[in-house]
Structures are given as C-alpha cells and as structure tokens.
Image: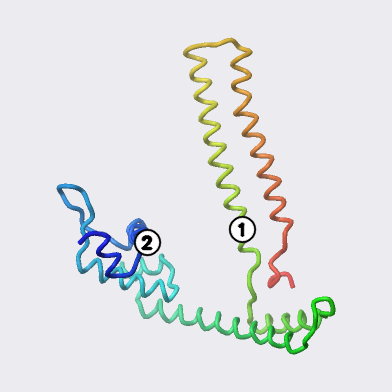
C-alpha cells in the first residue's frame, strides 16, 4: 500500500512515517520498477506499535533497542513507569504549592516569597524537581550556534572560490581585495554577534531548581 493509505489507516502523518524510517524504526520495501515505497501489514503493525510507545513517551532510541531485541519491552516500560510516576509526583507537589499560594489570596505586590522558597528547598531535599528553566536557553544557544556555523561555512566556501578564481583568472589586486573583504567582514561580524548572543543567553535566568 502507499504512504497515503498508511497515514489514514494508522493515524500517523507522512512526515512522521518518513522520520521513523530515517531513524531506522521502519524498513518498507521499494518497488523495483519505480523505486516507490510499498508498505505491507507488517509495516502498519510496526507503526502502530511505534505510535503506542511514543504516546507513552518512550524515547526513539529505546524503541529502536526494543525492536532489535537489545532491550526488553517489559524493562523499558518498568523504567518509563518510574519516570512517569516521578514526574507525576513532581507535578502534584507543584500543584499543591500553587494552591497554597492561592489560598493566601495575596497580590503580586504583597507576595512574600521567602516562606515558599524555603518550602521549595524542603521539597527538593525530598526529591521534588521543579521546571528546568535553563532548557529553553540551551535550545536557543544551540540554534544560534548552528545558524552561525552554517553561515560561516558558506562564506568560507565563497572566499575559497574567489581565491581559486583569482588564481586562474587574475583581476586587479585592489578590486580583488575589496571583493574578498566583503565575505571576510561578514564572517567576523557573525562571530562577534554570536559571541554577544551567547553572552546574552548566559546572562539570563539560571536553573531555579538547581540554584535555589
């Protein structure tokens, strides 16, 4: 069957089906004549299993290990159950603290945070973990670095091309210097901007759960 049929039957988007294939979770056969993917009932069953395990929040890597026989499904589920129960406990504790603050019926202007921060310390000592506010900063930093690296690689390739072209077909030195200066200046500008961006992100809020 075609991917459109599989999408409708399993309830997984074509994008995710292809993603699971890229991740090595799915291996559909290909038509020898046109090279198109052809899915069978075994692929549909595998996708349904993947869908179930992903909805239970099992990581892609663990699903791959389960499929290969490296990890037993029971072991993965027992471990996931522990993780979910811990998250549930953390969430319940956080909900309780929110309700406690609400019962005070206070305004932001009159809120006294010390008693609640002390309570949070006690909760953390007992194992409660609050939201990691540094995760978003890490993602932003990685995105900035990736974009900068791609741009630098492109500009570096342009510089290399210009030098190669100059070696084979020289132009006036002044003109070549001006042309070459543009991508080099752009690279330095991006590096400076990247360093400033990283410094800006690092200067943001720290992981409150860890620091306090």
Coloring scheme of the render? rainbow
Q: Mark 2 points at which residue?
A: 16
In the displayed structure, 67 sits above or below 86; it is above
* Local secondary structure at mark 1: helix
Q: Residue 137 is drawn in which quadrant?
A: bottom right
Residue 86, percent across and down?
55, 81
Q: Circle 1: is it few (<14), some (14-19), or many (20+) Cα within 10 Å?
A: some
Residue 90 in the figure: left or right of residue 1? right
**Front residue of 66 and 207:** 207
Q: Position of residue 32 (x, y in %)?
A: 15, 49
Instruction: Name the element at disc 2.
Output: helix
Q: Do the residues labelled 1 and 2 touch (CB within 8 Å)?
A: no
Q: In this view, does 37 lie to the left or right of 19?
A: left
Return the x and y of residue 43 as percentages of the image width and height.
Answer: 24, 66
In this view, the residue farthest toward the bottom is 103
Horizontal side, residue 196 vs residue 135: left or right: right
| Front position among marks 1 and 2 | 2
- Judging by the rendered image, the residue that carries numbered circle 1 is 138
Residue shown at the point (58%, 84%) measured from the top left: 89
Kindly give the residue lying farthest to the right in the view shown.
110
Residue at 64 percent across and 81 percent down: it is 128
Q: Residue at x 40, y 76 (%)?
A: 76
x and y percentages locating residue 11 in the rendered image:
33, 69
- Disc 1 and disc 2: Cα gap in Å? 25 Å
Q: Which residue lies at the image location 25% right of the left edge and 68% below the top edge? A: 44
Tally of numbered tags: 2
- Dot 2 surroundings within 10 Å: few (below 14), some, or many (20 or more)? few
Answer above or below: position of 8 versus 182. below
Q: Is residue 201 above or below residue 108?
A: above
């Amino acid at each position: 069957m075609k991917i459109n049929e599989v999408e409708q039957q399993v309830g997984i988007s074509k994008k995710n089906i292809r993603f699971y294939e890229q991740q090595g979770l799915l291996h559909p056969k290909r038509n020898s004549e046109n090279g198109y993917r052809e899915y069978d009932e075994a692929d549909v069953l595998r996708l349904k299993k993947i869908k179930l395990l992903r909805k239970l929040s099992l990581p892609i890597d663990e699903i791959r290990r389960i499929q290969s026989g490296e990890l037993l499904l029971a072991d993965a589920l027992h471990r996931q159950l522990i993780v979910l129960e811990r998250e549930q406990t953390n969430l319940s504790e956080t909900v309780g603290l929110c309700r406690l603050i609400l019962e005070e019926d206070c305004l932001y202007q009159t809120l006294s945070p010390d008693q609640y921060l002390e309570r949070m310390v006690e909760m953390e000592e007992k194992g409660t973990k609050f939201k990691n506010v540094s995760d978003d900063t890490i993602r932003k930093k990685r995105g900035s670095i990736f974009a900068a690296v791609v741009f630098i690689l492109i500009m570096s390739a342009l510089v290399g091309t210009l030098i190669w072209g100059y070696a084979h077909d020289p132009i006036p030195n002044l003109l070549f210097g001006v042309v070459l200066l543009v991508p080099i200046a752009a690279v330095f500008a991006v590096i400076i901007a990247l360093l400033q961006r990283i410094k800006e992100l690092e200067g943001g809020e720290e992981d409150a759960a860890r620091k306090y």
